[in-house]
Image (tube, rainbow, N blue to C red):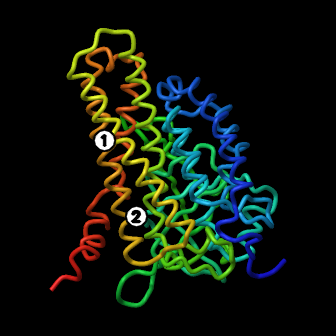
Amino acid sequence: MPAVIQQETGPLDTGTRDNRLSEAAEQVAALAARHAAEADATRRLDPAVIDAVRRAGFARHFVAAVFGGTEGGFDELTRAVVRVGAACPATAWCASLSAFSARFASHLPAEGHRAIWGESPDVVVATALMPAGRATAADGGWRLNGRWSYVSGIDFADWALVCAAVAGAPEGPPQLRFFALPRGSYSVVESWDSIGMRATGSHTVVVEDLPVPAHLSFDRADMLTGRNATSGVSAHNVPFQAVGGLTFIAPVVGAAVGALAATADALRGRRRTQAAELAVVRASGRIDAARHLVADNAAVLDGRLFTPEHMARNERNATFAAEAVTEAVGLLVRSAGTGGLGEGHALQRYWRDITSAASHVALQYDTAARKNYSAVLLGPEA
């Protein structure tokens, strides 16, 4: 097996393979919709839904073809996630993260690729992007300790990918590394109690004095810059700034599409007021605008337009889309009236899911978009 995985096709020649995901997403959406209320109540995705997400190809979407993966593009994945999000936002969130987590793990050394995908491309990886814990060099590898919160999909993941600071590094900013951990090598504390996205299982991963071999670790800087020494696959060589927000905003936009449909169902056949009609129309405009911006982000990634301007604009697009759909669902809730907030009504679930998901740090202006895109518009600070 070559040390560097080569992509079988160019970055824009993924349509035929990607269409399989688009078609499968329809089936996942139909199944997830039937289980959405139950998932919200039990705070867990139904096993049948988890299995459908795997079989649909979300986890394998960015996996190299040499391991049976799709080597897919960003546009088709985004459209598939939005479609599933319209049925069940929590399912779409986990589906999106299973795809993007495999992309992160592609930065592992070649032996790490074989460890994760050697037996199946449908292995689910759950990622903790925020650094926590400490790693110490030991015996040619690492020894790891720490706790990582908000690890979505960890309930059914086969691997966890966590980020930690390296102990004993020279003075200056700490060196940060990612570590891939097989299921059973860590424990999970069920800590996720958000009012929305309840079924994402975004619990806490705990590691105590765990030896991690060198081939299951990589430098966080490689992921941020998009440098990949072990894979030439297009999607494995993308700067995090360009792609980061897309991971989280696509399920939220899908949820907004579902919220609009739920509102229409609630209002259809009833006597309507001008205020309700106006609210629905205003909300629909915000949702469509968000969909276009998210599609534009995917086009930038598939077109490999990694200029500072395009990458900063992608950050702005993701944060603005989150703001737009949050405003939209607020309008929809007001248009539907008291009935829309009943526990048995789907609209209140979408409202809670969007409110929770849009609070993610990656979808906040101050995380990066404000500074980076203002520099594009106004130039560097004096």
Q: Quadrant of residue 212?
A: bottom right
Q: In the picture provided, is 62 more to the left or to the right than 256? A: right
Residue type at mark 2 is Asn
- The x, y position of residue 284, in whole percent, is 35, 36
- The x, y position of residue 166, in whole percent, is 48, 78
Q: Residue at x 27, y 14 (%)?
A: 272
Q: Quadrant where the N terminus lies?
A: bottom right
- Closer to the camera in the image, 256 or 183: 256
Q: Quadrant where the C terminus lies?
A: bottom left
Q: In the picture provided, is 18 more to the left or to the right than 379? A: right
- The x, y position of residue 334, in whole percent, is 24, 25
Q: Which mark is residue 314?
A: 2
Q: CA distance from mark 1 to mark 2?
A: 18 Å
Q: Residue at x 65, y 66 (%)?
A: 12
Q: Which mark is residue 326?
A: 1
Q: Quadrant of residue 333?
A: top left
Is 135 situated above or below 270?
below
